[in-house]
């Protein structure tokens, strides 16, 4: 009887759906091979739905450019004086263009209100290991690993009251800035992202994103520096994103 029960249990395990044990993995090897064929400094990190990180030179520091504006947004919304109340129209008129159009003047106004302490508090809570804040804020230092980890748990840092608003801003970036990861996004996935670039040059070209499909979500951070041009860098970024997200 005992032997029969063991056989029945083993059979039930074998018949269990394979999907319960499956976790998607990005196309890291193809992305690394592609990175080696492109000019410039390249770094990326991807976290799958189980929180496993796949990386390439992901601890290398880059100037943040406008990617840091996503941190400004979260740091502002989680303030004690803000988290449990409605935003004023003046606040929305700063936060919305800062994210959707990547407006620098709005970002500077928000950064001035926050101060370094609130930015560093968010970085500490998000377990950023190689983040450094400075002024001008576009020269702050970030890594792909830190940003992928931050975006993977983005909702953990957003107050419930403002979560929908933050999602709206990060999912409604203007069309002219939706190169790279948005072009590689698989059908059926919701995308929240922020990019940063060097005023039309190839100085830096970054995107950090979280993709959601029901209860599944993955994060991607691609940081690029010293490309021959902005157009070349955006082509590199899209090529990396398509390889990394293959099979999602």
Image (cartoon, rainbow, N blue to C red):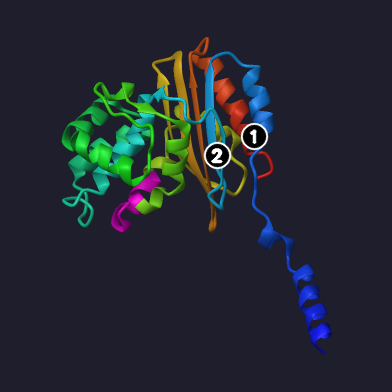
Q: Is residue 25 above or below residue 109?
A: below
Q: Residue at x 37, y 35 (%)?
A: 100
Q: Residue at x 50, y 22 (%)?
A: 224
The stretch of residues the image draws in magenta is 157-168
What is the quadrant of the C terminus in the image?
top right
Q: Are marks 1 and 2 in contact (CB under 8 Å)?
A: yes
What is the quadrant of the N terminus in the image?
bottom right
Q: Residue at x 66, y 17 (%)?
A: 37
Direction front: furthest residue: 2
Left-right relation of 158 to 60: left
- Which of the 4 image quadrants contains residue 115? top left
Residue wearing tag 2: 46
Q: Looking at the picture, how far across and down is residue 219, in whole percent?
A: 51, 43
Between 134 and 85, the residue placed more toward the observer is 134
Mark 1 to mark 2: distance in Å? Answer: 9 Å
Check if residue 165 falls in the magenta segment.
yes
Provide the secondary structure element on which disc 1 rests.
Answer: helix
Say few, some or many: other residues with alpha carbon within 10 Å of mark 1 (under 14 / 14 to 19 / 20 or more): many
- Which of the 4 image quadrants contains residue 47? top right
Number of numbered discs overlaid on the protein picture: 2
Q: Earlier in the sequence, mark 1 or mark 2?
A: 1
The dominant secondary structure in magenta is: helix
Say few, some or many: other residues with alpha carbon within 10 Å of mark 2 (under 14 / 14 to 19 / 20 or more): many
Q: Looking at the picture, how far across and down is residue 98, in whole percent?
A: 31, 33
Q: Looking at the picture, how far across and down is residue 170, in whole percent?
A: 40, 41
Left-right relation of 24 to 178: right
Q: Residue at x 29, y 57 (%)?
A: 161
Residue wearing tag 1: 28
- Which of the 4 image quadrants contains residue 56? top right
């Amino acid at each position: 009887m005992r032997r029969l029960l063991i056989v029945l249990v083993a059979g039930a395990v074998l018949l269990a759906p394979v999907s319960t044990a499956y976790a998607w993995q990005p196309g890291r090897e193809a992305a690394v091979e592609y990175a080696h064929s492109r000019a410039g400094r390249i770094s990326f990190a991807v976290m799958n739905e189980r929180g496993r990180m796949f990386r390439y030179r992901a601890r290398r520091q880059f100037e943040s450019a406008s990617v840091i504006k996503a941190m400004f947004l979260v740091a502002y919304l989680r303030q004690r004086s803000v988290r449990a109340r409605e935003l004023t129209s003046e606040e929305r008129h700063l936060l919305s263009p800062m994210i959707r159009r990547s407006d620098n003047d709005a970002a500077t106004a928000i950064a001035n209100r926050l101060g370094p302490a609130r930015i560093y508090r968010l970085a500490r809570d998000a377990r950023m290991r190689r983040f450094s804040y400075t002024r001008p804020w576009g020269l702050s230092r970030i890594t792909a690993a830190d940003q992928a980890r931050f975006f993977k748990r983005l909702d953990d840092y957003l107050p419930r009251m403002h979560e929908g608003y933050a999602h709206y801003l990060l999912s409604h970036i203007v069309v002219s800035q939706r190169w790279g990861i948005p072009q590689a996004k698989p059908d059926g996935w919701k995308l929240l992202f922020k990019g940063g670039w060097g005023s039309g040059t190839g100085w830096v070209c970054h995107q950090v994103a979280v993709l959601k499909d029901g209860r599944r979500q993955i994060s991607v951070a691609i940081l690029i520096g010293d490309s021959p041009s902005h157009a070349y860098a955006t082509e590199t970024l899209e090529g990396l994103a398509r390889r990394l997200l293959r099979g999602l």
